[in-house]
Amino acid sequence: MSFVPALSRRSLLSLAVLGGGALTLAACGGGGESEDGTPMVVTSNYPLRFLVERIGGDRVTSVDFATPGADAHGLELSVRQVMQVQEAALVLQIPGYQTAIDDAIASGPGDNVLDVAQVIELLVTELGDTEAEHEGESAEEHAEHADDTASDAGGESAEEDHEGHDHGGTDPHLWHDPLRIALIGDALAERLSEIDAEGADGFTERAAALRTELEALDEELAESFGAVEGTRTFVTSHAAYSYLAARYDLHQVGISGIDPETEPSPQRLLELEKVIDAEGVTTVFFEATASPKVAQTLAENVGITSEELDNLETQLSEDADYPQVMRENARKLVESWQ
């Protein structure tokens, strides 16, 4: 697949023609403010928007570029959205997750960015790597495996760079760990307090309340998963749940790697059939934001069921917020082991 970031294809030319500051955004006032005068905070996936809305409250305007039900990895930006990134009061960034966001930040001043990699430790993974050998490793733990080159998830070697989805050796799907989300919430409250000093107490209080809620969610999930004996293996269409697996001692087996568009090789599918048989897997999980065909075909070939698991990259239903989706995912996983 050849993926050309939207910024490279459209935005750089437009910015050169328009010149810095020549484009006025209808939805954005001066100094990173929205039309109603509140600071504009830009995100590009649902869990980060969830944090902004819960902690910022009505003192900020949240702008989320993620399209519900679409693959957030392949996000493209219009010229207007590029300018929103550059003019926002704050942009929440997961480096390597979305090329278009990284490019938009790089082409601007970059002083309005909260880089989550500076707040939490991202797990390290080789491109396409989904098995337990490296799953859930920190950067230090992964160093001893730096010479490994074979991928066991999508037929790619570790040196191969899947254009447009190079995650730089780190796994961006951090939001499946509630405690990491809580840490980002704390950092967000601090940055918002610098932007809006009058609202600082409210930001701090809401972040603390959310942390309490997320810590309770973590305990609830740990109890649910901990009640299941054995290896707790689950097969997913792509390896988006390494943080969940690392936090709760689960064994994730991805059909493809961290890039949902990577096609598994025939050899990989045969290996998966053996894993399913050996570990008594009853369900193959797919996601709404990616084609379910491979997962469903694999399940049919081995005579087991397939089930949807929400990767939380976008909010599929307004009636289900982050904690609710985490609980529902846990319920489905636990039921698959019973």
Image (spheres, grey):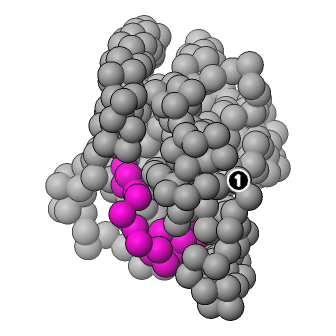
Q: Residue at x 67, y 85 (%)?
A: 18
Label 1 crowd bin: few (<14), some (14–19), many (20+), radius 10 Å: few
Is residue 274 in the magenta section? no
Q: Is residue 23 above or below residue 334?
A: below
Bounds of the magenta segment: 98-116
Q: Residue at x 58, y 42 (%)?
A: 37
Residue 192 spot, x, y in % from top left: 38, 39
**Element type at mark 1:** loop
The residue indicated by pointer 1 is 27
Give whichever of 162, 180 is nearer the camera: 180
Q: Residue at x 69, y 35 (%)?
A: 315
Query: Relative to 236, is 207 on the left or the right?
Result: left
Query: Relative to 187, is 39 on the left or the right?
Result: right
Is residue 103 in the magenta section? yes
Residue 144 spot, x, y in % from top left: 18, 62
Query: Relative to 128, is 1 on the left or the right?
Result: right
Give the amino acid at mark 1: Ala
- Residue 76 appearing in the image: no
Q: Is residue 219 above or below residue 332?
A: above
Give whichever of 169, 26 is nearer the camera: 26
Residue 294 spot, x, y in % from top left: 76, 52
Residue 246: name its quadrant.
Answer: top left
Q: Quadrant of the N terminus?
A: bottom right
Query: Relative to 254, is 188 on the left or the right?
Result: left
Give whichever of 292, 217 is nearer the camera: 217
